[in-house]
Image (cartoon, rainbow, N blue to C red):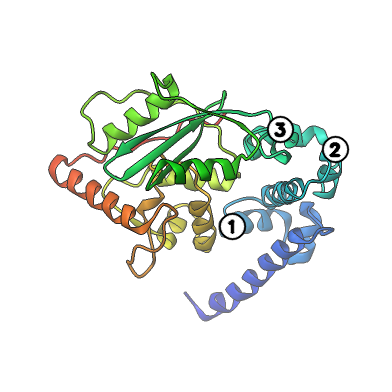
Amino acid sequence: MNSQACAMRPAADDALERVRAAIEQADGATDLASLATIAGLSPTHLQRAFRRRYGVSPAEYARARRFRQLRDVLREGAAVTDAVYEAGFGSGSRVYEESDRRLGMTPASYRAGGAGASIRYTTTQTPLGRMLVATTAKGICAVTLGHDDRELETRLAEEFPLAERERVDEGREEWLDAVIARVAHELGWSHRDAPAMPPLDVAATAFQWRVWDALTRIPRGETLSYGELAAALGVPKAARAIGRACGSNKLALLVPCHRIIREDGSLGGWRWGMEIKQQLLATERAMKATQGCPSNLSLPPAR
C-alpha cells in the first residue's frame, strides 16, 4: 500500500467514527444525506464504507440502536407508548412490525418480563453436563449448558421472569426432542438420524444473525479468530462487534460460538464455561480425525 493510501485510511476511519457517534446521539442525525455531510463523503461512498467497517448500513445501525434503547426503557418500566417515542420511533406501527424478530415478543410482553409468553422447556444430561432447551409457540428460544438444572432454570427465569414457564419431561414435545436429537447426532453422542431443525424465536439484529450464520459454516473441529471471521464477512474492522454478537448468543451448540478464539490462538472466554469449551472442541477434533466429516448444524430462518 502506498504512503498516500496509508495517510487516507485514518482520515476515513475518523469520518466513519463521526458518523457512528452521530447515530448514537439521542437527537443525532440518522438520514443518509445528513450523515454523508458529517463524514464529508458522498452518500453512496458512505453507505459502502460504513457497511464494510461495521457490517451493516447506517440505517440498520440506527434501527438497531433504537431497539436497544427501547429494550432499556421498557426494562425500566416505562409505558410502551412512551418507550416507543423515547427510543426515537416516529410511530408504534414500525416497532410492532419488527418486535417479534428483535425482541422475541411484543414490546408490552418484553416490558413485563415476558408476561403473556408461554415457554416450555426440558433438561437432559449430555457428555458436556446438563443442557436446557426452551421453546415458545414460534420456535426455539434458548439452548443453554450448565452444571445442574437449578442453574439452567435460574438463567431462563432471569431472561423471562414473568413468562409462563412449564417444564415438559414425559414425552417432552416435538421441537424440544428435535433439538436434543440433532445436537446428539452432530456431536457423535447418538447414531440415530438427525431430524430437521425447528424454527427459531430469538431476538437479534441483522448483524448478529449474519455472524451467527457464519459461525455455523465453520467446519466442525476447526476454529477462527474474531479478526478472521470479521475478514471473512468483509468487515475487517468489526472484530469487537463479532465478539459482542458471540456473547449475545442464546443458542449453545446450535450457534457454535465455541469455534471462535482470540487472535493469539488462546481460547478466550465462553459464556457456558471454559472447561466445557475445551471439551467440546476436543470432541469435534476427534470426530474430524476419525470421520473426516465437516458436518455442521445449520440455522433455520427465524420466525
Instruction: Give residue 170's mark.
Output: none
Q: Would you say 263 lies left or right of 206 here?
A: left
Q: Position of residue 190 (x, y in %)?
A: 23, 31
Amino acid identity at mark 3 = Thr
Which secondary structure lies at badge 2? loop
In percent of width and height, residue 117 lies at: 64, 29
List the residue tagged with mark 1: 54
Query: Mark 3 — residue?
Result: 106
Label 2 amino acid?
A: Ser
Give the camera-side residue of 164 and 54. 164
- Residue drawn at x 82%, y 59% is 28
How far apart are the two marked residues, 3 and 2, measured between alpha carbons? 15 Å
Q: Residue at x 34, y 62 (%)?
A: 267
Mark 1: secondary structure: helix
Q: Which residue is located at x 77 percent, y 35 percent?
A: 94
Q: Quadrant of residue 159?
A: top right
Left/right placement of residue 228 relative to residue 66 reads left
Eye-nearest disc, 1 or 2: 2
Which of disc 2 and disc 1 is earlier in sequence? 1
Which mark lies nearer to you, 1 or 3? 3
Q: Tell me the tag on residue 91.
A: 2
- Of labels 1 and 3, earlier in sequence is 1
Q: What percent of the width, then of the height, locates residue 150?
A: 45, 43
Q: Residues within 10 Å of mark 3 (few under 14, many from 20)?
A: many
